[in-house]
Amino acid sequence: MRVIHVVGARPNFMKIAPIMEEMAKYPEQFQQVLVHTGQHYDDNMSRVFFEDLGIPKPNLYLGVGSGSHAEQTARIMVEFEKVVIGGRPDPVVVVGDVNSTMAWAIVAAKLWVPVAHVEAGLRSFDRRMPEEINRVVTDALSNYLFTTCQDANENLRQEGIPEEKIFFVGNVMIDTLLKHKERALELGVPEQYGLEAGKYAVVTLHRPSNVDESAVLKGILEALGEIAKRLPVIFPAHPRTQQRIREFGLGDMVQSSKLSFTRSSSRKQENKAWLMEPLGYLEFLGLMADASLMLTDSGGIQEETTILRVPCLTLRENTERPITIAEGTNVVVGSRKERIVAEALGILEGEGKVGRVPELWDGRAAERIVGVLLNGKAA
């Protein structure tokens, strides 16, 4: 079986790594080809993840780079069509909900190549989110829909997806986290920055709804300043977010820090979030695992904090991962300063959610996916 795996952006790497590792156990059954679209091309958003996760060097690198949604999707489709015609796969494995995911699914489906979508069925029911469009289109075109939770199964049934295409396998993101957690903790990342375990907060922001509007971004940064009066706030910032902070003249609300800092320094009194370059997977996992609070607009981090039992505030109006609310540590708080601060202070007073591990989030999702592709049913 010739399998083409597609990655394009940071979240994809954690999802594809365990699948490739599991398939490698069956060299007579699988010939694997890894294609990197280059949707994320910054070293800290791409190359370092290959090193941290032990992912093989991509067989093909398309180098599509940045651009509008239409430009980026079109470039990926043009380049991928050449790849499929040059060596027809069966199937194409796509993960997540980035532009690369949808673009490859469209091309494969039009060329009658089977599509396997890992992390299918997640829905925010908000079509203003580009990722929601990508999810819906990819699922409609896929032949194998691998889901992480029961609500995703129900979403697919409601959309008319035949039951025989739906496979509840668990969460490959958690496969990766459980495999690498001890390595990440051994790095001692909090100590490198003079932080005490359980006595700091971590922030990530990248969604256009939060970073592309000056007033919204300013309000979030003000909230972080209030939280920073209670404990250090560490902000490994997406390149897009750093650019917007500069464009909107909000640099005085965050303090850049390219070097280690200590809590005992005068910086602590400035009540600002500490802006850092993006971290590699292991570094970020080690930082997140010992945090007392996570603030994010990332879907994957909502899942990871659920497993790590770290209270999570999602700075969005909705989530495509409601299981992290129902069973995990997540609370959706929106982007309003007052709500963010109130919820954060409540967590710091001991009111954070503990949660529990969702069904099949046990580190064996990739094993089940490969079992389906080999046998037509989950292992």
Image (tube, grey):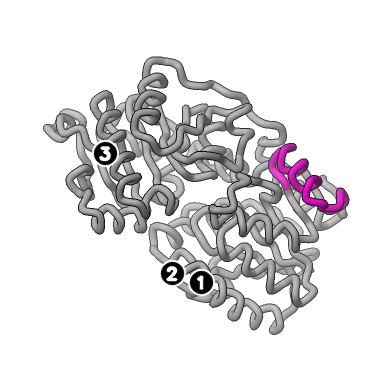
SS of the residue under disc 1: helix
Corner quadrant of residue 336: top left
Write down the region rendered in magenta: 147-165
Verify whether residue 339 appears in magenta: no
Magenta: main secondary structure equals helix
What x and y, as percent, mark residue 288?
42, 36
Q: Are marks 2 and 3 in contact (CB under 8 Å)?
A: no
- Residue shown at 28% from the left, 44% from the top: 218
Left or right of 73 in this view: 115: right
Question: Which amino acid, by three-letter code, is at mark 3?
Answer: Ala
Question: Looking at this view, is 218 or 151 the one in front?
Answer: 218
Disc nearer the start of the sequence (2/3): 2
Residue at the disc numbered 2: 66
Near mark 2 (Cα within 10 A), the count class, few <14, some 14-19 or many ≥20, is few
Question: Which amino acid, by three-letter code, is at mark 1?
Answer: Gln
Question: Which amino acid, by three-letter code, is at mark 2?
Answer: Ser
Residue at the disc numbered 1: 72
